[in-house]
Amino acid sequence: MGKQIAWNEIDNTAAEILEASDIIWDCAETAFLETKSMKVLCDLLRKEGFEVEEGIADVPTAFKGTFGSGKPVIGFLGEYDALSGLNQVAGIAEKQAFNSGAPGHGCGHNMLGTAALSAAMGVKKYLQETGKSGTVIFFGCPGEEGGSGKAFMAKGGAFEGLDAAITWHPGDNNRADTGSSLANYQVAYKFYGTSAHAGGAPHLGRSALDALELMNMGVQFLREHVIPEARIHYAITNTGGYSPNVVQPYAEVLYLIRAPRNAQVEEIYQRVNKIAEGAAHMTETRVEIDFVKGCSNLISNKVIAKKLWENLHEIGSPEYTEEEMALAKAIHESTDKPYESIDKFVREYDTKADKQEIASHKGETLYTFILPFHERGIQGFGSTDVGDVSWNCPTAQVYVTTWAAGTPGHSWQIVAQGKSGLAHKGLIYAAKTMAGAAIDMIEDPEILVAAKEEFDDTLGGEGYLCPIPDGCRPRAIGMTKA
Ligand SMILES: [Zn+2]
Ligand SMILES: [Zn+2]
């Protein structure tokens, strides 16, 4: 069987891949600063005979590795960015940093990129041994966290010409994703006023901080009059200083606007802009609207998702050691507010049989079962830049258990488990699942025909319109300028 070639290759190269995952965990570089992590992955690609192109689509830490020729062209998407402030000792079930305040892999992207690369290596071996037509591309996608790196890559045309894109995300359960996520824009509103002595000459001052507060108040009233699925979050990133006796000449607030579709985000964004301008008008200050990044809603391709789900079953969930189960239990017990994945799935699945099957696993501290295939798909209220890839070609992703049941997202617990056997076994399981689905598509062209039909139907003639305006550049977290 063709797939066995890829699966054997993934097993044979597992030591190298797991080492790479651990090294990237150590590097823990945040959005668009991932130079060391990128080098780890690029070196592996070159060693494997992939043709590597760095800095694609004008994003310095984006890259791709290509192998093979002809159709179909299948892309694997890999991430490798970390989160700020989540530094944590590996392998323990208590919060303890070894470099307080430093970044950590709190979303498991050390596993994400390396598993996608492992899948690409498996498919490469399969193409080599069988001599079949096909091109496999590993996409190094930086800055997923707060950066929407893939949207910048999509704007530069990186995903054009793909027949399918496959990716995964580490998680606390095994399932094929058929759901959607929200599109978003992240925008900085920068208010410029006039400084003055707040006691001596307040009448000469024009407060940027007042403008910011009025803007937030305006948006507060707006929230009742937008579609219920929309989310409007904010963070005040600059209050203008620590001195109440100075009229603040500068203040800055960062908004994150989400809605199910790009056009809805755009509409809310225009309304938020009016409020910002109104606040500036009221206070005789000036506002600068600085678009930071945006990403599109996710369109999961169910045809490909089904193939991923079948491969999850065909391969089967890994066996875990007592030590791994003990870590999962300890981590599970360390969460005072465990993430409610099982309860959520029970609510969201449609049939009684599915609900009962899922509910029967409640109380387990490591979910090793595979969730039923969910035809309708769940509307997620977060966002992912995989969305921008999904508007360019049929795209699907799988979730694989790499951490304890109930592990909260973006937490020290994820970092703590990132080098464990749970992480390593899940990573390899994900790699095999993605490679298996890709080979199914190479061996049976009908799958890609059906996937493309579904893609065209879902888009209904609407083309991809990248939410990022011309001239907007990717920027590292916390940077006010690109
Ligand atoms: Zn994340
Ligand atoms: Zn993530």
Image: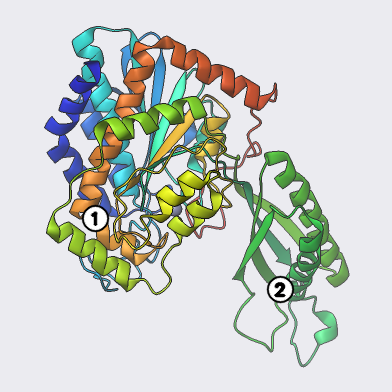
261 over 407 or under it: above or below: above
Q: Which of marks 1 and 2 is in front?
A: 1
Taking the spot 82% from the left edge, 65% from the top edge, the residue there is 280
Which quarter of the image is occupied by the N terminus? top left
* Mark before the other along the chain sequence, 1 or 2: 1
Residue occupied by mark 2: 249
- Residue 375, above or below 210: above
Q: Position of residue 441 (x, y in %)?
A: 38, 17
Mark 1 to mark 2 CA distance (whole Å): 41 Å
Numbered label tally: 2
Residue neighbourhood size for the residue with mark 2, other residues' Cα within 10 Å, grouped as few (<14), some (14–19), many (≥20)? many
What amino acid type is highlighted by mark number 1? Asp
Q: Can residue 55 be seen in this view?
A: no
Residue 233: tell me if it is visible. Answer: yes
Three-letter code for the amino acid on which mark 2 is drawn? Pro
Looking at the picture, how far across and down is residue 454, in whole percent? Answer: 58, 22
- Residue 74's disc number: none
Q: For the residue labelled by badge 1, is the local secondary structure a helix, a strand or a loop?
A: helix
Residue picked out by circle 1: 26
Q: Which residue lies furthest to the bottom in this view?
A: 199
User: Is 55 left, or right, of 89 in this rendering?
Assistant: right
Q: Residue at x 74, y 73 (%)?
A: 213
Of helix, strand and loop, which one carries label 2?
loop
| Relative to 221, 73 lies left or right | left
Quarter of the image for residue 314 reads top left
Q: Could you tell whether 362 is left or right of 131 in the image?
A: right
